[in-house]
Amino acid sequence: MQLQNKFALSCLSVFIAASAAACSVSSTPEDIEDVGSEPLAAGGVGVCNQADPYEKNNKRSRATELAYNGIYFEPADPEYSWSEDIGSAYTIVSASICKKDQDWYFVSTSDLPYTPGWLSIRAQAAGASHCAMMEVSEEGGETYTVGYDPPAGPHNTIQIDVYSAGTLQLLASAQSNIGRIFLDTYNGPLDQDLYLRVHGPKEAHYGYNLSVVVQTDAFEDECEL
């Protein structure tokens, strides 16, 4: 388990951590057209990048397949009855949501060399930090702020829905109005291929980072101080 935890934490270290988002369930959405929008005047946070290579994946039929950046697998040792498979695979992507837009991704879990037991999805939109913004106090009494939370509102709202690729059943969903999603699904029907749908309200207009980790078991909170 310790090796697994270290692998998962290193996979996500390019970001840095956060607060859980509430989960909800809804029916399978209809595909909508990506009408795009004009980029905002200033670069950086709040800009929809129409040169984003993933902007054509606005329908499930055009879902972008996410290849894994790394796969780790340590099979159980048959000499020890308590030994278990330890496996973790991760994929990371940077993309953008334009107004009235949605992005679809395809993630294969059925061909991993182990049976998945834990799915972790992390997303940061509109400049949100991986971990929630917080004040940190030093021994001398000095305090400073780490992280960033975008202003709450529809323009910074992101939602991620997870579907079975075979049945289109909604397996999990999370939404955040401050651009940060922590979505963990344990023991569900994860040993199958998945579709991920990233979207927001019509006002949503931002760049985002998305990471997906598929593991045999959970890992510790990467935002814990």
Image (spheres, helix red, strand yellow):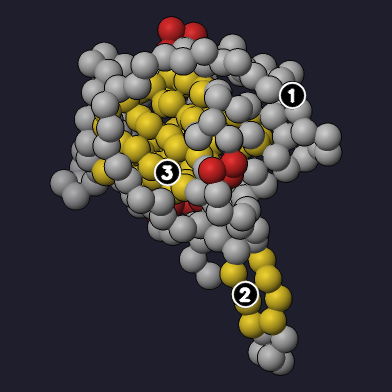
> Alpha-carbon neighbours of circle 2 within 10 Å: few (<14), some, or many (≥20)?
few
- Name the residue type under label 1: Glu
- Name the residue type under label 3: Gln
Residue designated by label 2: 135
Compared across the picture, whether 199 is left or right of 81 comes to right
Name, please, the residue furthest toward the top: 61
**Where is residue 70 drawn, in percent x and y?**
52, 31
Q: Residue at x 52, y 13 (%)?
A: 33
How many numbered badges does the structure rendering display? 3
Element carrying mark 1 = loop
Q: Residue at x 38, y 22 (%)?
A: 195
**Where is residue 141 drawn, in percent x and y?**
69, 91
Q: Nearer the viewer, mark 3 or mark 1?
A: 1
- Check residue 38 in the rendering and tell me which mark sits there, or answer none: 1
Assess whether mark 2 and mark 1 are in contact (beta carbons under 8 angstroms). Answer: no
Q: Is residue 224 above or below residue 64?
A: below
Q: Residue at x 83, y 38 (%)?
A: 42
- Check residue 175 in the rendering and tell me which mark sits there, or answer none: 3
Q: Is residue 204 above or below residue 149?
A: above
Element carrying mark 3 = strand
Name, please, the residue furthest toward the bottom: 140
Does label 3 or label 1 sit earlier along the sequence? 1
Q: Nearer the viewer, mark 3 or mark 2?
A: 3
Compared across the picture, whether 115 is left or right of 58 comes to left
Assess whether mark 2 and mark 3 are in contact (beta carbons under 8 angstroms). Answer: no
- Name the residue type under label 2: Glu
Name, please, the residue furthest toward the left: 81
Q: CA distance from mark 1 to mark 2?
A: 36 Å
